[in-house]
Image (cartoon, grey):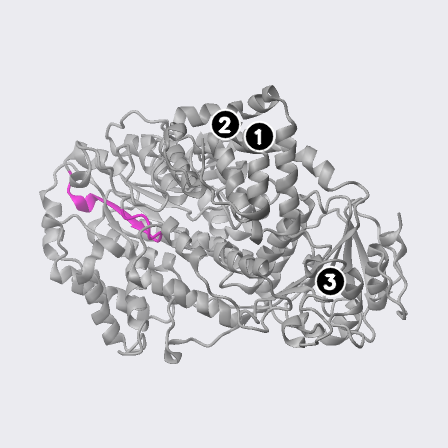
Amino acid sequence: MQFNAGLTGEAATLARQHSEMLARLPATVHALILVELQKWPLLFGPEQRYQRALLEHLSGLSRRELDQMAAGVERIETDAGVNRLGERNPSRFQDDAQALLRKRGLNVAWRGSVDGFFQRVDPVLEAQLYPADAPRRLVVQLYGGGIAVQREKLWSRFKGAGVRVPLNLEGANGTERFLEALFGAREPGRRVPALFAGAVESSPFDAWLIESHEALHALCETSETSGGKDRGPSAGALTGLSYDRLRVYRDDLTRALNRKIQSGVESPQAFAAYARSLQLVPPAGTLLYSAEVLLAFVRDVLLTGNGTLLMNNTFVEWAAIQALRRAQPRILVTRFGVRDKLKPFSSMVLFSQPRASDHNPVVQDPVGSFIDVEQLSYYVWLNAEKNAAYRQKTLYLFLAEGVDEMLAIRSDTPAATPSGMAPARVADVYATMAGWLGVPVPGTSGRPIGPLVGP
Amino acid sequence: MADWWLPRRLFAQRTADRRKPERRVIVVTFGGGVRYEDTLAREGWVNIPHLASELVPQGLVYPVARHEGLTGHFNSTGALVTGSRQNVDAYGSEAPVTPTIFELFRKEHALGPEEAWVIATNKSFGLMGGSKLRSFGDPYSANVVLPKQLLISTIKAAVSTEAGPGVEDRQALAERMMLALDEGYEGFGWKVFESGRVLGAELKASLAKSLLDYFNDPATPTSGDELTFFMTKEIMNRFAPSLLVVNFWDIDIAHYGAYSLYLEAIRRTDRLVHELWQHARSLREYRDRTTLFVVPEMGRDSDVAGNGFANHRSGDESCRRVWLVALGAGVPKGAGTERPIKTMDVAPTVARILGFNMVECEGKPLAELAF
């Protein structure tokens, strides 16, 4: 199948270099790869590295090996008549092929077959892209104050995993003091707290803060507004997404979607295509660091994640999972908060903009929020552990503000460890994270918690 | 209340029917996709107190039921009412491709349209009432009512502009509802196969008033399923249809990613199923002659192998593993069987109960029930 993908730059070069191999692939897999290459400027570094490795690996296979791997997909394509499709645009070809596969009742078989294809490829690529001696990673998940934590149920999803560390919260009461003690204060001339400043190596995408409210963002200085002539916009910055700070952008998106609904939508697919085409961007100062790839990421999170436009904690979870999968930051911090109660029949006015007189008062749901975040933080952990970038090399910390206990899971020793530890100070947790990452944080009074940072 | 909101000429049609069976069947989809672990598994009983402690002991439980086929709402419910896997548009723009129990039932017994109803919270179920097959289709389809969608459309219209009274003026809201019904009821919420397929003025007025009363009541208007329940009771009271499929769907709020709201919806569905059964037992037309089936049309993704409770498209086992509870006429009390069944078995079972021939399908009648 010959496609017209309209590629430019490095993506075009890659497609040209591997054109012979691509032409031998089943048409749907060929189109799948080209669609990814079309997104090249909006792919994060790890995604680009994966695509390069994928093409090189497939080109390195013998014709017989490749044909064997592709046979299952080829057979289903033939049965469905996919090869008779005339569409040359890979994206539209995908849509047509999916419609055809569905019509013939072959879409489930096709999906299984394509999964099988990549299950043979991915272990090889993972070993290459994520060697055992790759740098350690850190994922911290925080429950903000106000969530009605039930101690007897706290982190109950993590049955048999990790170690419960008692905490001494003296001197770390209140959100601001707690977070400063946890991540270190911002040093003069720095945009971000000490732990992050030490860990952000080459790119603002090395460290991500994703939260429902703004407490983590309050620890940082927005690169867009710093204005220092001696610093580039990305120097010392990190990536931050706040559901609350994105309010204006969310409202803009909601209004645009509402207008489209009011004017008529021919199909869910057409609606999704319209949503993808929206050129709206968050106002200046909304993000800690702003780049094209990040703007596209935020838009996708809000438009493709179930409930992310409506539920703050769902936004946090989905954005975190997508960041882990796509950008693979070295540090990820999530902070969940209290969500509002859903109003009766809220879907009636989901995409409309009712007048103030039509509003019911906003009521918070601290109890429901606890049930939600228990599940959502678990999903973030599960998804991280499904990712080769994080398996075996990540320290996961779970903390709830105001709770004198922490759950720590080392992904290389995930089994539950009997606690029996002396209470640790929040400064010790800070030193532990720094020690785990190998980040120097001079001047801290904290001491690393031995079992968590040892070999 | 029911006296005024449905047209007398529809009511009068009942006397013309001579072949109405003695038995009644109500199929309730515990709908929106629900996981076994969150419901019938021991750890899920806390979410279904009425089913677990009151209904299951009165009936027969099949803890090992499976949904085959596509794991979308329309196709999974379509499989339930046809006995065969369906593979049509997931958003309801196509009808089932094999005959539904409504068409088969009505055609064989020569029954009028008031004998088979679908009352659905899911807005995409407008075509669930029948196939488009030449020898079946609209003349034999079920009446389909989408009460929530009707109300939503009206409210949306009322609040979408700065002009006008908004939703606080109830009289204006009633007028909006009338307007909505005039503007194309099939588009959002009301498909009744009357003569000429035109909604009568009396029916329009009474429906609007009925919904308005419902909306005005501060005690009940909290969810689409509450509204569906309300409408189901009204239809039972007025028509006493022999075959009723009730689609509860609030549980699909799981897509918002809020686990607590998902659990809350499960508890609400559990309560509504119980209240529905109580209502059926309170009506002479249903008491002692009705068989109730309660069955999720499908599950939702597992945490580990799938994408979690918020989704149901992975096709993993958790998406497919469901359960079925039957109770009432012809059902042994306090029984249970580990025999694996399929959700597609519901359709041929309904056919046996109501005494009509089922076309060839993938499901098999549930042999544990007395026909």
* Figure quadrant of residue B84: top left
* Figure quadrant of residue A193: bottom right
Identify which amino acid the numbered label 2 is placed on. Answer: Val
Identify which amino acid the numbered label 3 is placed on. Answer: Leu
Instruction: Please say whether residue A54 is visible from this viewpoint.
Output: yes
State whether discs 3 and 1 lie on one chain: yes
Mark 3 or 1: in front is 1
Query: Relative to residue B149, is residue A344 drawn left or right?
Result: right
Mark 2 or 3: in front is 2
Which residue matches tag 2?
A: A73
Q: At 24% from the left edge and 40% from the top edge, which residue is drawn?
A: B130
Residue A298 x, y percent position in the rendering:
55, 60
Query: Relative to residue A234, is residue B292 drawn left or right?
Result: left
Identify which amino acid the numbered label 1 is placed on. Answer: Phe
**Which region shows up in magenta?**
B111-126
Chain letter for mark 3, please.
A
Residue A429 x, y percent position in the rendering:
82, 63
Which residue matches tag 1?
A: A117
Queried whether the magenta region covers residue A333, the answer comes back as no
Query: Relative to residue B241, is residue A354 drawn left or right?
Result: right
Label whose residue precedes the other's in the sequence (3 or 1): 1
